Amino acid sequence: MDISDQFRAVPAVITDPNRQKYAMSGVALIEATADHHIFLVCHDNKRKYDSPADLPSPRFGIVTLNSASNALAYDPLQWSNGNTADLPEDLECLSKLPLRDQSAFVAVESSGRVFYLELEKSPVTNNYVIVKPELLHGENLKDISCDKIGRTPGMEFEGFSVQELSNEPASSNNLLAVWSHRGDDKTPQGVIFWGTIDKTSKSFLCFDWHELVVDWPRPIVSRMQEREVVNYARQISGLKILRDGTLLIASAIDPGDQGPFAGAVYKAGEFTFSDNKYQFRAYRGLELKEIYTTGKKEGTQGHKIEGFEEMTTSPYSLVMVTDDEKLGPSIAVAAYPPED
């Protein structure tokens, strides 16, 4: 199913022409009502591009989707009352933690550093603000992944999702956690890792891993100054564990800040919970089903999908956000399962 025409540009701060600062690399639902859905999004901004240094580019923002008008609104969030000591760098992943009575989230940098944060509404403005942000100093997904895989390849993390599949949440203090290396010229395969995150300590345990290569998009080979240049496909540019245990991944081609971008969404496998542990069955061959594409059909504008979230109201659908570099962020709401 081609969904290229379902993406809409997200309005950034009107007075700021630099839309790249608002490109979205992750999304998580905060609240859903009959009137609107409100999402937390993350941005992959880096400190070296912050100007001035004491006024950093946003690392997180709030997107509101109005149910009646279908209008989008965006507002950046300030990081921890202006404290930039542990300001995130190159955030690529975001997931809500399914904890009771708590708007808690985990965000992950491409380097594997993990951040924990909570949101609450300001009693003055009634807008969401970040509280209790914390860099989990003892947790780096790169170290955890390399220890499990038995080698130390270069890794860039572009997917992370947390879900609770047990029908008896009180039976376990561990949530299912899945994260991924995107694949690049040094390690062309995408690598999915899964394990648990402890609800209390926020510590990770890696159980296993699985390598993955998608059929499309394929690498782009071009010639530049008498030599061949290969733009490798990012096998995994984002992922999401759905509430039924299905693992969705996005794959993308990223030839530069101006694109053109293209990508696809696949069903990559399914997780189950039994005997007090999480198990994964990876889809292989024809089972690895391409369910959405963007930019695959000639004449369509593609997008680099980097984040998913489930809508919690009928009809059942998925929200997808993009990091289209200098073209800025866009959002699509697509029916799930696809209509064709």
Image (cartoon, grey):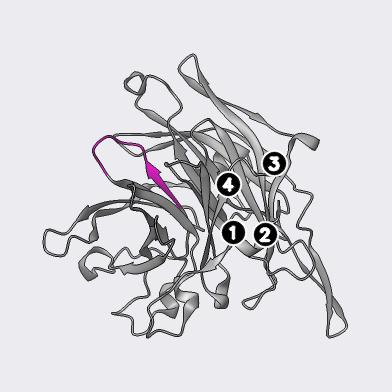
Residue that mark 1 sits on: 305
Q: Are marks 2 and 3 in contact (CB under 8 Å)?
A: no
Give whichever of discs 2 and 3 has the lower sequence position. Answer: 3
Image mark for residue 335:
4
Give whichever of discs 2 and 1 has the lower sequence position. Answer: 2
The residue drawn where x is 75% and y is 34% is 287
Q: Are marks 1 and 3 in contact (CB under 8 Å)?
A: no
Give the amino acid at mark 3: Glu
Residue 181 versus residue 237: which sits nearer the camera?
A: 237
The residue drawn where x is 66% and y is 62% is 4
Mark toward the viewer: 3 or 4 = 4
The answer to if 101 sits in the magenta stretch is yes
Label 1 CA crowd tier, 10 Å (few <14, some 14–19, many 20+):
many
For the residues labelled 3 and 4, the Cα–Cα distance comes to: 28 Å
| Badge 2 element | strand
For the residues labelled 4 and 2, the Cα–Cα distance comes to: 20 Å
Q: Are marks 2 and 1 in contact (CB under 8 Å)?
A: yes
Magenta residues?
Answer: 94-102
Give the amino acid at mark 4: Ala
Give whichever of discs 4 and 2 has the lower sequence position. Answer: 2
| Badge 3 element | strand
Label 4 CA crowd tier, 10 Å (few <14, some 14–19, many 20+):
some
| Badge 1 element | strand
Image mark for residue 252:
2
Give the amino acid at mark 1: Ile
Residue that mark 3 sits on: 211
